[in-house]
Image (spheres, helix red, strand yellow):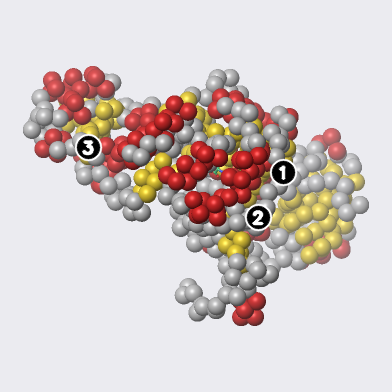
């Protein structure tokens, strides 16, 4: 046998056993004369190997030649350690080495393989396979596996079939840009990589599969925002003969199952459900972090008309209350003001009210202490609290207040990564008007059905009315992150045609792009709906981390590059010719 045990397995009960282990040399400690300790590591843990006076010379000689990350095989006897390390499960034993075989040498790794490494991000990305040897990454990838297995267990137990859909599909850009693949056998024609299996899963419903899921790679050629990957993974699901409530039950169930099985957390209560409108008004975001309160409050009525022109000219004035922050110094407030004025947030300025032993504000000139006190009472700012106020155009101001709220939440330590607060956000607008292209876009995607009560408006020619149509769409949100989104779909050909019309497609364009789906709707499409979870993000949140990169074995960098293999890369001219692609000058790096 190559090995009898792993490096994470042996305990005091195994004392006296003859064993063979294999793994990587974490470190060698020479304690003088014949006494050496080797920490031998594999995926399962670390076991101490020791040599002493009785060790044969061959073994002692081999130990002298070992370096970090050498791959070795060790035979020996399990013994009780003299000085125990109770921090690790194998810390009470060691293996007294009788034979050591070097299976492979290793060059000195470019950074230390430790939980806290000295390697910078770029270096670690280049040597990803070494980075993956470190515990934080190994644990992240292991957690991802557990999440995938538990997802499959739950969905299988509910009768879902896991069905693969193609990666080489028809390009139907709507939303993000498609990655395209030239077809050698069809000169001048291209496949696209799927942005999601949306149309296929709907066709599977037409085919009668009733409950489908897939843990599937999706591809979007977007300008990369922080922590986005050009390829990412979804838990993609679809169900027939359902209403929104059925979807909520099923996938709240999945989320709870994952919390329980992966993190040992029980959620007895139903997840809160709030409307998009409420989320925007109270949290300034469609993915609210509800781990803390600090809701946005509309104080337009209270503050307008007192001669302070900034407020008087604003269409909206909103406030948040930072509990216990009345002691903020001038310097802290100046810094916060500069923070909200950064272009990312774009506020004009920040007005504050400190409610301490006396009431102080940056607008004392315009409001009496009584007025300010009564405002504080109204919005729940008590003794010791700080009120932060922004004003301007409503949508923009709400967004800025939402960002400020998150910042204050972080500063006050109210966003603990080990606390999980999921919720549903629903009733999104169906359509979003884009000024630049002067047309409507589907806020979710063009297959999302309007809410039945808004059908009349859906057929209106008036853009204002169309803008009010609500979608039968929902997002599941966790700690300020959208972890999943979906909708009840359009299953009626006429409604789908109308949707394409609103989106500005001619009949021919709609036919060219989505004819296959609309055709299928002729042949008995059941009412259906579904959801897709962003699996990478879900894993990161379960792992208590902010970034998804550690939860993907081989991620791309911020520029969408694989820096390990150095992709994308040029292909040779012959290959280009074969694909009927004109060669272009090398990209400037
Ligand atoms: N296909 C959608 C997406 O990728 C999710 C869904 O509607 O099920 O966002």
Q: Residue at x 42, y 50 (%)?
A: 504
Tag shown at residue 391 = 3
**Residue 334, image x, y percentages:** 22, 43
Q: Residue at x 87, y 47 (%)?
A: 4
**What is the distance, in whole Å, between disc 2 and disc 3 at their CAs?**
47 Å
Q: Give the side of residue 495 with respect to residue 60, left or right.
A: left
Looking at the image, is mark 1 or mark 3 earlier in the sequence? 1
Examine the image and state in which quarter residue 94 appears. Answer: top right
Other residues around mark 1 within 10 Å, as few (<14) / some (14–19) / many (≥20): some
Tag shown at residue 167 = 2
> Which of the two discs, 1 and 3, sits closer to the camera?
1
Q: Residue at x 26, y 32 (%)?
A: 318
**Residue 218, image x, y percentages:** 59, 51
- Secondary structure of the residue carrying tag 1 is loop
Tag shown at residue 163 = 1
> Which of the two discs, 2 and 3, sits closer to the camera?
2
**Disc 1 and disc 3 in contact, CB within 8 angstroms:** no
Write down which quadrant ligand 1 falls in: top right
Q: Give the side of residue 535 with respect to residue 427, left or right.
A: right
Nearest the camera: 101 or 93?
A: 101
Residue 76 visible in this rendered orientation of the protein: yes
Q: Give the side of residue 3 with respect to residue 167, left or right.
A: right
Nearest the camera: 332 or 500?
A: 500
């Amino acid at each position: 046998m190559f090995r009898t045990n792993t490096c994470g397995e042996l305990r005091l009960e195994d004392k006296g056993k003859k064993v063979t282990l294999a793994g990587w040399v974490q470190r060698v400690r020479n304690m003088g004369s014949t006494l050496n300790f080797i920490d031998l590591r594999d995926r399962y843990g670390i076991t101490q190997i020791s040599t002493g006076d009785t060790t044969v010379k061959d073994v002692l000689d081999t130990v002298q030649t070992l370096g970090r990350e050498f791959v070795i095989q060790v035979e020996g006897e399990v013994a009780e350690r003299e000085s125990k390390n109770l921090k690790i499960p194998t810390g009470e034993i060691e293996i007294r080495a009788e034979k050591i075989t070097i299976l492979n040498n290793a060059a000195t790794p470019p950074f230390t393989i430790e939980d806290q490494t000295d390697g910078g991000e770029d270096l670690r990305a280049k040597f990803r396979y070494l980075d993956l040897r470190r515990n934080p990454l190994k644990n992240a990838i292991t957690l991802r596996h557990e999440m995938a297995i538990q997802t499959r267990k739950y969905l299988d137990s509910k009768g879902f079939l896991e069905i693969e859909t193609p990666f080489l599909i028809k390009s139907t850009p709507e939303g993000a840009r498609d990655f395209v693949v030239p077809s050698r056998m069809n000169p001048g024609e291209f496949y696209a990589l799927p942005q999601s299996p949306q149309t296929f899963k709907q066709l599977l419903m037409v085919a009668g599969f009733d409950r489908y899921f897939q843990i599937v790679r999706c591809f979007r050629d977007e300008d990369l925002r922080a922590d986005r990957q050009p390829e990412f993974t979804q838990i993609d699901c679809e169900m027939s003969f359902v209403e929104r409530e059925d979807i909520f039950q099923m996938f709240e169930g999945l989320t709870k199952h994952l919390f329980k099985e992966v993190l040992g957390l029980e959620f007895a209560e139903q997840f809160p459900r709030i409307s998009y409108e409420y989320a925007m008004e109270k949290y300034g975001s469609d993915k609210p972090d509800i781990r803390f309160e600090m809701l946005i409050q509309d104080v337009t009525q209270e503050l307008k008309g007192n001669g302070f022109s900034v407020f008087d000219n604003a269409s909206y004035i909103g406030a948040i209350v930072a509990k216990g922050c009345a002691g903020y110094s001038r310097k802290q407030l100046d810094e916060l003001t500069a923070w909200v004025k950064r272009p990312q947030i774009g506020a004009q300025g920040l007005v504050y009210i400190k409610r301490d032993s006396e009431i102080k504000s940056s607008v004392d000139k315009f409001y009496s202490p009584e007025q300010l006190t009564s405002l504080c009472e109204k919005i729940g700012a008590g003794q010791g609290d700080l009120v932060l106020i922004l004003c301007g155009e409503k949508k923009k101001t709400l967004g800025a207040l939402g960002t400020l709220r998150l910042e204050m939440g972080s500063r006050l330590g109210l966003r603990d990564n080990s606390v999980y607060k999921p919720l549903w956000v629903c009733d999104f607008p169906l359509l979003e008007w884009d000024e630049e292209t002067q047309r409507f876009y589907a806020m979710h995607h063009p297959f999302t059905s309007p809410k039945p009560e808004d059908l009349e408006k859906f057929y209106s020619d008036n853009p204002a009315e169309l803008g009010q149509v609500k979608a039968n769409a929902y997002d599941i949100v966790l700690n300020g992150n959208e972890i999943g989104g979906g909708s009840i779909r359009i299953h009626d050909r006429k409604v789908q045609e109308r949707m394409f019309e609103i989106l500005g497609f001619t009949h021919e364009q709609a036919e060219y792009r989505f004819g296959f789906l609309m055709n299928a709707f002729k042949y008995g499409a059941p009412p259906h709906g579904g959801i897709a979870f962003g699996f990478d993000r879900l894993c990161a949140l379960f792992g208590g981390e902010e970034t998804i990169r550690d939860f993907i074995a081989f991620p791309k960098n911020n520029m969408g590059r694989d820096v390990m293999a150095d992709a994308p890369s040029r292909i040779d001219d012959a290959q280009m010719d074969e694909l009927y692609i004109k060669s272009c000058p090398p990209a400037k790096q």
